[in-house]
Image (cartoon, grey):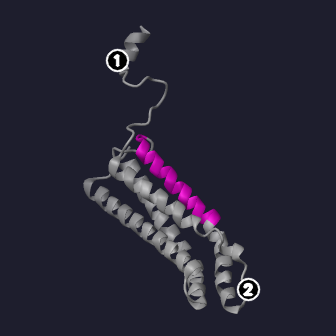
Amino acid sequence: MWKLNRRWRQTTLIVHIVAAGAWIGIDVIVAVLVAVGRFGSGVETRSLAYQALAAFVVWPMLISALVCLATGLLLGLGTKWGLVRYWWVLVKLVLNLGLCLLIVTALRPGMAEVGGYGRELLTGAPDPAAVSELFYPPAVSLTALAIATVLSVAKPWGRVRRGSRPRGDTKRQLVTARR
């Protein structure tokens, strides 16, 4: 396998960290817009919060998530950490893939209804079902991103075991045992 040289590793790591920071920031914005939409003081403010949520959140979030995924893959393939060599890297990869899937399958399809709810707030009786579960996306995503951040710093759990070789046995011990 190829390895990233020092300069490319640092550049990729910086892009990865900036994309993750942007993703967390966008999730915080989502949480604020949801809170303003639900608990805001004026109907105009609440309407604008939902319309902004529908118009401006999904694509920046998805782009930052995909940049995180791409740079994470590069770092995994091009460094000693590997993609499935260490548990913390594997868990981060699964979290990222899961969140990207949720953005595309759960969040994006409902944004038209959220925007419509925001417009209907100004005209009369909106259907509250369109925004009843908006608390969950930022809660789930921010929790998963916080876990990924902790994993990046703590690097827990060690290596992923491959095959049926018992932990601690060396190749030489296995060869000797077979004779």
Question: Where is residue 3 drawn, in percent x and y?
Answer: 33, 48
Would you name the residue on which mark 2 appears? 125
178 is higher (above) or lower (below) than 97: above
Residue positioned 40% across, 25% down in the render: 167
Residue positioned 70% across, 92% down in the render: 123
Q: Which amino acid does label 1 sit on?
A: Arg
Q: Tell me where the magenta segment starts and ends, as one range.
A: 85-106
Residue 43 is left or right of residue 18, and the answer is: right
Residue positioned 26% across, 54% down in the render: 6
Would you name the residue on which mark 1 appears? 172
CB under 8 Å between callouts 1 and 2?
A: no
User: Could you tell me if residue 3 is visible in this image?
Assistant: no
Which sits earlier in the primary sequence, circle 1 or circle 2? 2
Q: What residue type is labelled 2?
A: Ala
Judge the density around disc 2: few (<14), some (14-19), many (≥20) Cα neighbours within 10 Å: few
Judge the density around disc 1: few (<14), some (14-19), many (≥20) Cα neighbours within 10 Å: few
